[in-house]
Structure formats: structure tokens, C-alpha cells
Image (cartoon, rainbow, N blue to C red):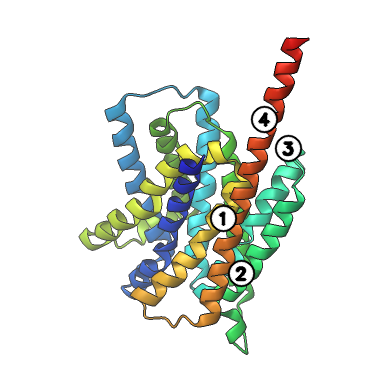
Amino acid sequence: MIKYVLMVLAGAASFGILSSFVKIAYSQGYTPAEISFIQALMGAGALWSFFLASKKQNAKAKDILWLLFAGASIGITTFLYYLSVKYIPASVAIVLLMQFTWLGILIEWILFKKRPMVLELVITVIILAGTILASGLTGQKEFNLSPKGVGIVLASSLVYAIYIVANSRVGKNVYWQNKSAWIMTGSAAAIFLVNFHTVAFENHIGPHLLKWGLFLAFFGTVLPQILFAVGMPKVGASTSGLLMTVELPVAVVTAHLILKEEVNLVQFFGIVIMLSAIIGMNVIKQRGKAAELVIKGTEGDLKTAE
């Protein structure tokens, strides 16, 4: 199980480095629609190449529909998040995006009647407290937030939670090569449909944008999708949602190194709180699962003896 936990963490960390480079792309005149679409399109192309090379096809028609839905969810999440940072500070946007931690648990509770454990609720509160500190919000006195930007990133957070739940429940028996290719096809299609006019008629497609697409596709599409496709079904939606909060500390550190943004001691303290909560959550849950296996094994031995 530790291997799958590390896969989800690495996928989330890969997402974390993107925002700094996207801001650089914006400074060169590119738009959220162009950046998110070229990222999804090139990522889908790479994943289909992996699939064709592997020849591991076992997705049924029902699986494909659900995988396209999951892909549309992550595609819209990416576009909305990239769009939100045009209106509000990136540090605020990432904190609001982190609301997917409890939204994912809530969705599973409402749709699948999976009541959250007290431990999950406590850890979620701790992680959210850590995200506020890690973002540097506590060191700022005034906020002039755009309601539009706040609304966009909260919508992104909700769709992100839907993606996590969907990806952890659909296509469990589908080979990751097949699963990831269909997911990113849905992602590219959704971004294109939402931004049809911009992508089709107002784009700046050229060699330089393709270079951005190649970079962002690898770290924002190919690598995370492979890791999530393999790891999420094993880890589960609730734990995956908590693990993926590592995106925030990675984003903060990357912004410090790439964009030279200031990172103070309070922010580092917030990062430590988040990571400690995530590690503690998984250690306790794994011990609980081990105890359940021991109990079930004992019960099985007793029934056999009877």
C-alpha cells in the first residue's frame, strides 16, 4: 500500500510545480484556454501512444463513458484553476482549491452513503489549517479578492473533488494505459468544447506554444495520470483527496525557487503541519486495516474449527 500512496503523492507533487510555469507562460501572452488545451491535447497524444504500444485494451463501452466523464472533470478543473489565477493571487487560489479535501468526502457520503470517519474529519480540519498557514494568508493585512475569481476557483475545487471520486471508482479493472488515454481524451474534448471559439479562432499556436505544451503535458497530464490511474483505486477516494493536498507545499516551494516569491517561517510551519497530518492519517489507517485483517483471519479460523 505504501507504494500506491507514494504514487498519488508524486502525481500531486507534479501538479504542484505547474502554476509557477503557467504564470510565466501568461507573461508571454498566452491564455488559460490555450495553455490548458495544448497541455491536455499533447498529453492525450502521449498516453494514446503508450496504449497503442502496449496493446492492452480491456475497456468496455460502459467503462469508456465513465472514463471520459472523469477526464472531462479533470480537464475543466485545470482550465478553471488556470483561469482563476488571472483574477486572484495564486496563494489564495491554491488555498481555495484545497477545499476538494472535504468536498470529496462529502460527495462520497451523499452519493455512496460512505460516512466519514471521525479521524478523516479531524485530519481534514488540520490540513485546511495548515494550508492557510502555508499559503501566507496570515501574513497579509488586506484582501481585495475578485468575487469572479473566488467563484471560479471554488467551482474548480468542486469539479476536482468529483474527478477524485470518479477516478477512484471507475475503470478499476482497466489497464492503466487504456484508462489514462481515455481520461485525457475526455479532458482535451471538454476544454475544447468550453473554449471552442478561443481555441479554434483566437489561438497563438506555434513552435513556442508547443514547447510549453510538451512541458506541461508531461508534468501536468502524462505523469500524474499514470500515477493516479494505478494508485487511486488502491488507496481510495478519501485518502487520495488528503494525499493530494501535498500539491500546496510543492507549489509554494516551486514559486519560491522559480518566481522568487517570499516564503516565510509561518508558511514552512504550515507545510510541516500538512505533511505531518497526511503521514499520520495513513499510518493510523494502515494500522486499522491490518487489525481488521487479523480479526477477519481469526474469525475465519474459528469458523473452520467449528
Image spot of residue 300 (x, y percent): 71, 18
Image spot of residue 225 (x, y percent): 43, 44
Image spot of residue 155 (x, y percent): 62, 59
Image spot of residue 144 (x, y percent): 61, 84
Which SS class for mark 4? helix
Distance CA(mark 2)–CA(mark 4): 35 Å
Q: Badge 4 is on which residue?
A: 294
Q: Please rate how many residues cluster around mark 4, counting C-alpha atoms within 10 Å: few if below 14, some from 14 to 19, many from 20.
A: few
Which of the two discs, 2 and 3, labels the residue nearer the N terminus? 3
State the mark number for residue 112: 3
Name which quarter of the figure residue 178 lies in.
top left
Which of the two discs, 1 and 2, labels the residue nearer the N terminus? 2
Q: Which of marks 2 and 3 is in front?
A: 2
- The residue lying toward the viewer, choosing from 135 and 178, is 135
Identified by mark 2, the residue type is: Gly
Which SS class for mark 3? helix
Farthest residue toward the left? 207
- The residue lying toward the viewer, choosing from 34 and 101, is 101
Which SS class for mark 2? helix
- Residue 213 horizontal side relative to residue 16, left or right: left
Q: Nearer the viewer, mark 3 or mark 1?
A: 1
Q: Which of marks 3 and 4 is in front?
A: 4
Q: Are marks 3 and 1 in contact (CB under 8 Å)?
A: no
Which of the two discs, 3 and 1, labels the residue nearer the N terminus? 3
State the mark number for residue 279: 1
Q: Badge 2 is on which residue?
A: 130
Which of the two discs, 3 and 4, labels the residue nearer the N terminus? 3
Q: Do the residues labelled 2 and 4 touch (CB within 8 Å)?
A: no
Picture residue at 59% right of the left edge, 75% below the top = 133
Q: Is residue 218 visible?
A: yes
Name which quarter of the figure residue 213 lies in.
bottom left
Identified by mark 3, the residue type is: Phe
